[in-house]
Amino acid sequence: MGGMRLVVTSDIHIDKNGQETLDALAQFVEKAKADVLVVAGDVATSPTTFLHTLLTLRAVAAEVVVVAGNHDVWSPPQLVASGQNAWWRLDTLLPALCAEAGVHDLDAAPWRHGEVEFVGTLGWYDLSMRDESLPATEQDYRAGEFAGMKWMDHVYAVFPGVDGTRMSIEAVAGRLSARLRAQLAASTAPRIVGVTHMVAFPEQLHHKPFPGWRFAQAFIGHRALGEAMLADPRVELAIAGHTHMRSDLQLGTLRAVCAPLGYRSEWRGLTPTEAVAASVRVIDL
Ligand SMILES: [Fe+2]
Ligand SMILES: [Fe+2]
């Protein structure tokens, strides 16, 4: 079959980066003539902005594939109390918004396009990529606070279990990696592209000496996501976000790409158009 042009981005954070950034991204996608635009999470915490962003991108790409990011499932405590917790956001609100925008939400269902199946999930982190040399305690990881940094998912991403109490990060990560494995197992496609928000391979982490940064590594990825994709030789491309650090690695037969836009404050003075050009990847399958 003919080639398929993917345009890959993530961490576009439109509610922080603004309309000008969305316009720059839409312009890039339109010029690239994307067959499939892949957005690997962190679109916008505001549901209105999430929908507006996807409608805008849907208008310039033939197809759009999305997984949610952690920021897309955040709710303030008063909404969590009324049932609008992270599971509700992930499995009820966001699929409805994606359907309204005409885009494919992989947490709701995998999506096959020709011979390629797109599978994926938000995923979650456990502590499997934590920096073992850091003197942070188990309690520090549970609290999400160390060396002056506070991990805000511990406040705003509330995943309740059946008894109503908060699930551990390992339990959330386990449930979502099981979702990815089930999609892989059910797929009959000869070629697979895996999309996760959370980082799937430790090789995708970037190391910096600051204790707060080293602590945060624990909340970036989940090794089981990568292991599931490496175990299936049909997976030729794995796309992740969440880390705001770009990478493009070959791991055996699998190409692993992170193409995050990140926050304006991380752009080192680039304009939105320049930041989009520097981060977005065009991949011809
Ligand atoms: Fe992000
Ligand atoms: Fe994220």
Image: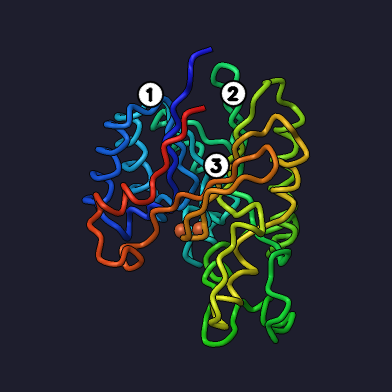
User: For the residue carrying disc 3, how many other residues have a C-alpha within 10 Å: few (<14), some (14-19), or many (20+)?
Assistant: few
Q: Amino acid at mark 2?
A: Val
Query: Does label 3 or label 1 sit earlier along the sequence?
Result: 1
Of 110 and 204, the residue lying toward us: 204
The answer to which image quadrant residue 61 occupies is top left
Query: Does label 2 or label 1 sit earlier along the sequence?
Result: 1
The answer to which image quadrant residue 1 occupies is top right
Mark 2 vs ligand 2: CB below 8 Å: no
> In this figure, which residue is indicated by the disc labeled 1?
62
User: For the residue carrying disc 1, how many other residues have a C-alpha within 10 Å: few (<14), some (14-19), or many (20+)?
Assistant: some
Query: Does label 2 or label 3 sit earlier along the sequence?
Result: 3
Badge number at residue 116: 2
Badge number at residue 92: 3
Q: Is residue 89 visible?
A: no
Which residue appears at 75% of the width and 47% of the height? 227
Say which of marks 2 and 1 sits in front. 2
Which residue appears at 73% of the width and 64% of the height? 128
Q: Amino acid at mark 1?
A: Ala
Which residue appears at 37% of the width and 38% of the height? 54
